[in-house]
Structures are given as structure tokens and as C-alpha cells.
Image (cartoon, rainbow, N blue to C red):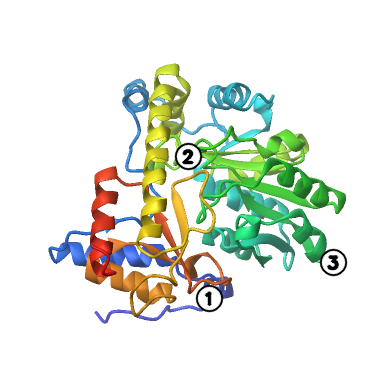
Amino acid sequence: MNSVTEPLVRLAARVDAIQPFYVMELAKEAALLERAGRDIIHMGIGEPDFTAPEPVIEAAANALRRGVTQYTSALGLHALREAISAHYAGFYGIDVDPARIVVTAGASAALLLACAALVDRDDEVLMPDPCYPCNRHFVIAAEGKPVMVPSGPTARFQLTAADVERLWGERTRGVLLASPSNPTGTSIEPAELERIVKAVRTRGGFTIVDEIYQGLSYDAQPVSALSFGEDVITVNSFSKYFNMTGWRLGWLVVPPGMVGAFEKLAQNLFICASALAQHAALACFEPQTLAIYEARRLEFKRRRDFIAPALESLGFSVPVMPDGAFYVYADCRGVAHPAAGDSAALTKAMLHDAGVVLVPGMDFGTHAPRESIRLSYATAYPKLEEAVERLAKLFGRS
């Protein structure tokens, strides 16, 4: 049988509109080198090296033994929605009705649902550049148009209320934000976020805020966008702070009047999130489990406090100290290497010549991607130290 290299039928145009996820392509290239016997240090993919703690694993095992693995409500287990609501009360000091919480198959499903519910063909959605690459692709999948707004260090690589006021047009439907952000690890200052929400509300638009990294905040108590009104939609996840990446579980908080619409879409697109993951996630909010997560948060902070100045010692510039998540977004123009200022070529050289994986800025937008690289410090501290040693040799600083 002949192998087929071209599709037998025409693919939808949206396929061509969605670009490859370069971090995953680099990961595949690194895997090939590893299979050839190379030792590779991974600082590319944003995945915690910590996995689900024992109470969560035991809760999953108990769920299997009890056989509670059937479909759940499309909105999620009532007990889990109540636990998430209690978490908002305890962690943020805000009252979120469990009825507004929609449990999803990860934050990706949450963002897809939000775009499906809110974005029509040719609707424009404002978002910062740089930002998480899938965000613009969710908008494209809904046949909308992402408007990437160049956002530099002076704005903490974030959208501002002034941007909203300046760029809002006839086709603008809303904004899609993240705080803290991937790839920059920076948060939107609460006062600025409140101004953004008010600017969007005045124009009759929607505000979606991805808060999946808020549990990993290091320099101040985080403030949820939910504090600024019930019309704000937030996205969260069990992947990052709760260390359950492969369990594919997240949630939305939506305005009361939108719950029915989101439920209808969830029923048709996903049926429900994994029942097993939902039962396991109930254990995330137990005091003993939260103590584990707090210790892990402090370990991530320790890694940040090491790697950011270490990057600068190698010749990179870190224009904004990340205050959350586990990323550093750095300027690569100052390193002593022929590929300085060309992040795509430089990350290739770091992979092949030093065995270290970082991600070029081209994944995250079109605003200065050649001069920017993203580092994920979601890897063990000794590995970070070794990576710095390897890069010091590559850049002649050892």
C-alpha cells in the first residue's frame, strides 16, 4: 500500500491559519537527540517537574475502586464546584457562587468554550503580544480575528487600558488576557486590570482572564479579576499550581446569565471533563495537600531567584522580573554568540551545542520575536545550575 502524504480531501482553511507550536517542535528535536544518547536539559515546555501529590493519587485510586467513573454533569461534579468556590473564599476572599463554575477538560477546553460562546466570524479580540500562542488560535478556530497588541517591558508585556481605548473598533468584541502570563511570568497590576475591565465594560465587550498561574505568585498576594465584577470570565486549571498537567482538568467562572449557554456548548463539545480527574481533584483542597503546594510554590520562587540573575550573568537581559508562573522572558541580543539577536538560531545552537532547551520568541507573537527567548524554570534546581554551567561554556563565560 502506498503511503499517503497529502490529505485525500480538502482541509478547512482554519488549519492553515493556525501555526505550529514551536516549543513542541523543539521538544521533538530534543527527543531525537536523547534517543541518540545526548543528555538534554529541558527548560522549554511549561510543565511542573512536580507531579500530583499522594493525597490526590490516593483519591484517584479510591474513585477507581468505588467505580465512580461514569459521566458527570457537563458543568462538573457539584462537590468539586463547591470546593473551588470555597477556595476562592479562602485564598482570594471573594464569594463565587458554585453555580457560576464550569469544570472543563483543562484550561484549553475552557478557552475554547469561551471563544465558542462569545466570538462570531470576523469579531476582533485584543490580546497582548507576546502571549500564549494557543490563545490567538482559539480565536481563529471560532472564526474570529486576534488583534495582537505590541506590549513591551514598560507595560510589563501586558495589555493596558489605554490600549483598549485606543484600539477598540467596530469589530472589537473583547479582550483575552493572562495574569500571570505565559511567556513572561508577569502579572497585570490590579489597578490597571480594573481599568481594563471598566474600559471593556463601557464598550459592551467581554473580558476573559486566564488565571492558571495565579497560585504561583511570588511577590504579592494575587488579586483575581473576579473582584472587578460578575461580568468578568476567568479561566483556571489544575495543571500548574496543582501539578496535574496530564489529568486535563480546569474550570471557568462565568457570569450567571451565561451558565446555560456554556453548559449547552460543553454538553455538545465535550460531554464532561474526566470523572476520575474530578474526583481526584477534590483532594487538592485538603489542608495537607495545600501545605504541599505551598512548599512547592516556595521552591519555584527559589528557582526564579536563581535563574533570572544567572541569565543576566550569561549576557541575557531580563527587562521585567517575573512575579509569577515559572517563566523568564529574556532579551538575547547581548550574549556572546554569532546567533545573538536571532532567537530561533540561538535556541538551535543551545540545543545542539550545549544540550539545553529554551524557546524562541517566535512562538509568542510578532513583536520583537527574534530578540526574545523564554525559559521555563519548572525543572529541578540542580538541572538549572547545570544548564547555566553549560551555557556559560557556550558563551565563553566559564
Tell me if I can see residue 272 in this picture: no
Q: Are marks 2 and 3 in contact (CB under 8 Å)?
A: no
Task: Determine crowd level at label 2: few under 14, some 14-19, many 20+ residues with C-alpha closer than 10 A.
Answer: many
Q: Quadrant of residue 170?
A: bottom right
Q: Earlier in the sequence, mark 2 or mark 3?
A: 3
Q: Identify the residue shown where x is 82% and y is 59%.
A: 165
What amino acid type should be assigned to the residue bearing mark 1? Answer: Asp
Q: Are marks 3 and 1 in contact (CB under 8 Å)?
A: no
- Residue 130 drawn above or below residue 345: above
The residue at the far top in this view is: 287
Q: Mark 3 falls on what kind of element?
A: loop
What amino acid type should be assigned to the residue bearing mark 2? Answer: Leu
Residue 302: percent from left, percent from top? 38, 39
Quarter that holds the C terminus = bottom left
Q: Mark 1 falls on what kind of element?
A: helix
Q: Quadrant of residue 87?
A: top right
Is residue 228 or residue 78 the one in the foreground? 228
Q: What is the distance, in whole Å, between disc 2 and disc 3 at their CAs?
A: 36 Å
Left or right relative to 171: residue 131? left
Left or right relative to 154: residue 173? right
Question: Mark 1 sits on what residue?
Answer: 16
Question: Mark 3 sits on what residue?
Answer: 170
Task: Determine crowd level at label 3: few under 14, some 14-19, many 20+ residues with C-alpha closer than 10 A.
Answer: few
Tell me if I can see residue 163 in this picture: yes
Q: Identify the residue shown where x is 74% and y is 64%.
A: 123
The residue at the far left in this view is: 37
Question: Mark 2 sits on what residue?
Answer: 249
Q: Identify the residue shown where x is 43% and y is 79%.
A: 8
